[in-house]
Image (spheres, rainbow, N blue to C red):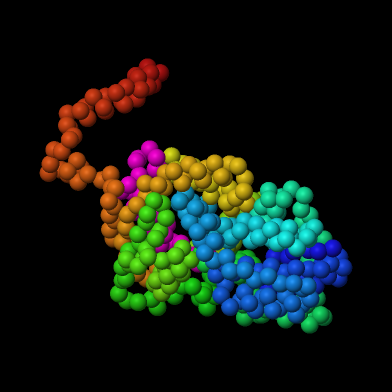
Amino acid sequence: MKIVLAYSGGLDTSVILRWLIEEYDAEVIAFTADIGQGEEVEEAREKALKTGAKKAYALDLREEFVRDFVFPMMRAAPLYEGYYLLGTAIARPLIAQYMVQIAGEEGAEAVSHGATGKGNDQVRFELTAYALNPDIRVIVPWREWTMKGRPDLVAYAKERGIPVPVTQEKPYSMDANLLHISYEGGILEDPWAEPPEEMFRLTTDPRLAPDEPEYVEIEFERGDPVAVNGERLSPAALLARLNTLAGRHGVGRVDLVENRYVGMKSRGVYETPGGTLLYHARRAVESLTLDREALHLRDRLAPKYAELVYYGYWFAPEREKLQRLFDAIAEDVTGTARLKLYKGNVAIAGRKSPVSLYDQRLVSFDEKGDYDQKDAEGFIKINALRLKVRARVLGRE
């Protein structure tokens, strides 16, 4: 049989590749998605072939990832449980989409992945696979084999001459893409333990960041960012530029204990420098250009959207319908935000838009504008009516 394996080049998927060959007598086709890992992608392809893969794909999906997944998601301004910018979650549907596509092209009857039976990724990969091909078979070694954890995998790999990337100096797992890096497991499983400073790769220690603030301007057109400091960039190049700018000022670190979809809590540490800037810049421009009720409606629905992305329902009808609503609202988001970066912090320093709804004459205390202050009396009395009625009732008890 043929199996397409989503392959990262790490310990888990390297062991899985060999295990699938031995246990299923399978031809394994490895697929590695380049969504911002850099040189690791070609290294993974070569390692897959050396480990026994019949064929190995390494596809550059960076532009598609940012354009078709990150930017649409960010039109919703979603945060999972108030903090998480969904950097890992948003990458999974793209990887699974290509995993299923390659299976079709190669005539493979099954796909496989390296997600454990305890995490969210297994759900994200498999919901996507079934949504795109209801007849696909999914093989998940972590739910089949007798190996219990990383020590067993290390022993298995050493027995078969597979290089082991996990060391005592870095006893945690990482997942990287253009939007973020996530760290979990190992020494991070103790929620009381502070992450080691040497762990971080995208962001400077805020204490060592420049002593002078830096200003960054991000321009949006009809919902999406298009330029940084006046320079128009492709989606992937724009996010990479913001990662560099924010990273040198230590912006974008998050440490949280989150609720996984499968029911347990887990501790994750994230670096999302460019995404953090995009989140704050978007909200700054939205404050000028979005009607109050449209903005409030989006913000009421954004937590549900974030939940759908986190759980793995990117290709579900409810996410797609919410997306159409958020895309329509985002059509009005055109303008520029100026951000101030300093020692791990990002502050809004200014915002402007050619379609701004902000009327300085209307809001000014120094000008009357089109607003008659006497109208406020009736407005307040009408809105106070139910409160007055309730007060009288409570007063009679």
368 relative to 217 in the view: left or right = left
Q: Position of residue 121 (x, y in %)?
A: 66, 58
Front residue of 315 and 293: 315
Q: Position of residue 148 (x, y in %)?
A: 78, 66
The quarter of the picture where the C terminus appears is top left
Magenta region includes residue 291: yes
| Residue positioned most to the top | 396
Q: Is residue 309 above or below residue 362?
A: below
Q: Position of residue 13 (x, y in %)?
A: 72, 70
Front residue of 397 and 90: 90
319 relative to 152 in the view: left or right = left
Residue 78 seen anywhere in this rendered image of the structure: yes
Q: Quadrant of residue 221?
A: bottom left
Residue name at image x 27 percent, y 51 percent: 354
Q: Is residue 195 above or below residue 132?
A: below
Residue interval drawn in magenta = 270-296
Residue name at image x 12 percent, y 41 percent: 367
Magenta region includes residue 167: no
Q: Is residue 364 above or below residue 396?
A: below
Front residue of 392 and 199: 199
The quarter of the picture where the N terminus appears is bottom right
Residue 84 seen anywhere in this rendered image of the structure: no
Q: Position of residue 315 (x, y in %)?
A: 62, 48
Q: Quadrant of residue 229?
A: bottom left
| Residue positioned most to the front | 105
Residue name at image x 26 percent, y 28 percent: 380
Q: Main secondary structure of the magenta part?
A: helix
> How many numbered tags mark residues here?
0
365 relative to 176 in the view: left or right = left
